[in-house]
């Protein structure tokens, strides 16, 4: 089973468009992994993402002064809005104090600086969630709801889940059709100034698992309710009603409540990011009840729903795929599907899994025509 994008790359992706400077504390040359495989914006949109170029002697002797001097020098030249420092396996094993480094950088530059305790051993969604929470602590200001408008925030948008297939644009269009103003989008197509005004929205809409910890943080700090779900297929009216209900009752709608009690079936399965997979499977079940379930090797980060099995190891996934007739998954899962004797697989690419390899085949599940084609393919066992 292929590995997903690592948590340190998730940090860089989460903060990419916000005018800051992200430093991945890692061995020399490892920036190419992030830029080549994990960031589709790299060739079209500039961002200050650096690697510390840690050498063997730096690691052995604990030479933290070099990375501090390098970060301070770059920050003084670039004057970013903030500095974020993310860790990788070597700093983790040698016990580098990333928070201490961030404090020293901030004291010398007067630029807000923070550390994200990543180690490259966890999935990108963990890094995204950690980065956004650290950012929110430094920049989001409390204020009241905006008068005369129905503003919502979108939480959990990066190209790792919302790549070049137009899904984020479709989500924005769905919000506009429902009469909602996008107050802030964490964190694509928006600026840090908009994110700082997050507390002005009436409802936070969680659009991927990486956005749920942030939504729960805002609920605790500002009392803003959240809705955890996507308007996939026939779920669109339910999504609209959930946002309205959350705003009226000042109460959140978790994924389990949004998706309902349907536990799915074993005939077909959708494998991918936890929330997207769960919403897709639930929408398929509106077409044919009890036919589809959602699977994900990624951690749920709190996306709990009867229809979803997440954080699956290779062995667990192979066992759970037994008896499945049709599987929609990234093509890199075809091997394990064959081992589990799945009847047929459908290409359902995920940027965080296979990068640019199958990007042209990403399915925009938020547009009716591509979604209907996916459903037809899933439910047509005669193929």
Image (cartoon, rainbow, N blue to C red):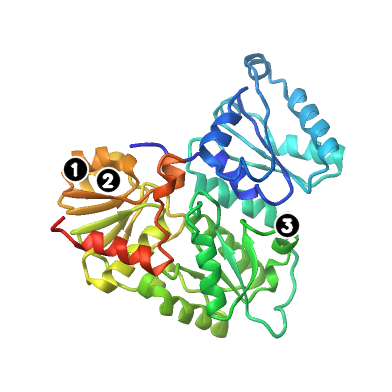
Quadrant including the C terminus? bottom left
Q: Residue at x 58, y 36 (%)?
A: 35
Q: Is residue 95 above or below residue 167?
A: above
Of mark 2 and mark 3, the one earlier in the sequence is 3
Whole-percent x, y for residue 66 in the image = 76, 23
Label 3 belongs to which residue? 192
Whole-percent x, y for residue 34 in the image = 56, 35
2 vs 1, front mark: 1
Label 2 belongs to which residue? 317
Whole-percent x, y for residue 203 in the image = 59, 74
Using the image as rendered, state which of residue 225 and residue 156 is in the foreground.
156
2 vs 3, front mark: 3
Using the image as rendered, state which of residue 253 and residue 357 is in the foreground.
357
Q: Contact, CB < 8 Å: mark 2 with mark 1?
A: yes
Q: Is residue 319 above or below residue 30?
A: below
Residue 273 appearing in the image: yes
Q: Is residue 49 above or below residue 171?
A: above
Q: Is residue 306 left or right of residue 58?
A: left
Residue 96 position by quadrant: top right
Residue 313 appearing in the image: no
Label 1 belongs to which residue? 340
């Amino acid at each position: 089973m292929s590995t997903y994008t690592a948590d340190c790359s998730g940090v860089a992706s989460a903060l990419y468009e916000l005018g800051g400077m992200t430093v991945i504390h890692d061995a020399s040359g490892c920036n190419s992994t992030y830029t080549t495989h994990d960031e589709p914006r790299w060739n079209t949109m500039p961002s200050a993402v650096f690697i510390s170029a840690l050498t063997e002697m730096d690691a052995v002797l604990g030479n933290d002064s070099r990375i501090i001097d390098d970060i301070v020098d770059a920050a003084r030249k670039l004057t970013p809005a903030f500095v974020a420092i993310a860790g990788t396996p070597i700093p983790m094993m040698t016990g580098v104090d990333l928070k201490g480094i961030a404090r020293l950088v901030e004291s010398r530059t007067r630029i807000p600086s923070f550390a994200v305790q990543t180690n490259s051993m966890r999935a990108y969604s963990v890094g995204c969630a950690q980065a956004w929470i650290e950012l929110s602590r430094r920049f989001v200001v409390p204020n009241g709801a905006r008068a005369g408008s129905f503003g919502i925030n979108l939480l959990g948008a990066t190209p790792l889940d919302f790549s070049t297939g137009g899904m984020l644009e479709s989500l924005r269009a769905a919000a506009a059709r429902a009469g909602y103003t996008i107050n802030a989008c964490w964190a694509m197509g928006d600026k840090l100034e908009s994110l700082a005004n997050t507390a002005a929205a009436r409802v936070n809409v969680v659009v991927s698992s990486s956005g749920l910890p942030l939504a729960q943080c805002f609920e605790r700090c500002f009392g803003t309710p959240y809705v955890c779900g996507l308007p996939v297929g026939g779920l669109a009216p339910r999504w609209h009603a959930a946002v309205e209900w959350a705003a009226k009752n000042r109460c959140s709608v978790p994924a389990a409540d949004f998706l309902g009690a349907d536990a799915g079936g074993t005939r077909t399965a959708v494998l991918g990011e936890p929330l997207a997979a769960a919403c897709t499977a639930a929408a398929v079940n509106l077409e044919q009840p009890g036919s589809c379930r959602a699977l994900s090797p990624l951690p749920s980060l709190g996306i709990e729903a009867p229809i979803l099995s997440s954080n699956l190891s290779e062995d667990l996934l192979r066992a759970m795929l037994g008896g499945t007739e049709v599987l929609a998954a990234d093509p890199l899962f075809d091997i394990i599907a064959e081992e589990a004797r799945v009847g047929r697989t459908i290409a359902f690419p995920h940027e965080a899994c296979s990068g640019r390899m199958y990007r042209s085949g990403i399915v925009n599940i938020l547009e009716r025509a591509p979604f209907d084609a996916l459903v037809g393919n899933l439910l047509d066992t005669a193929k």
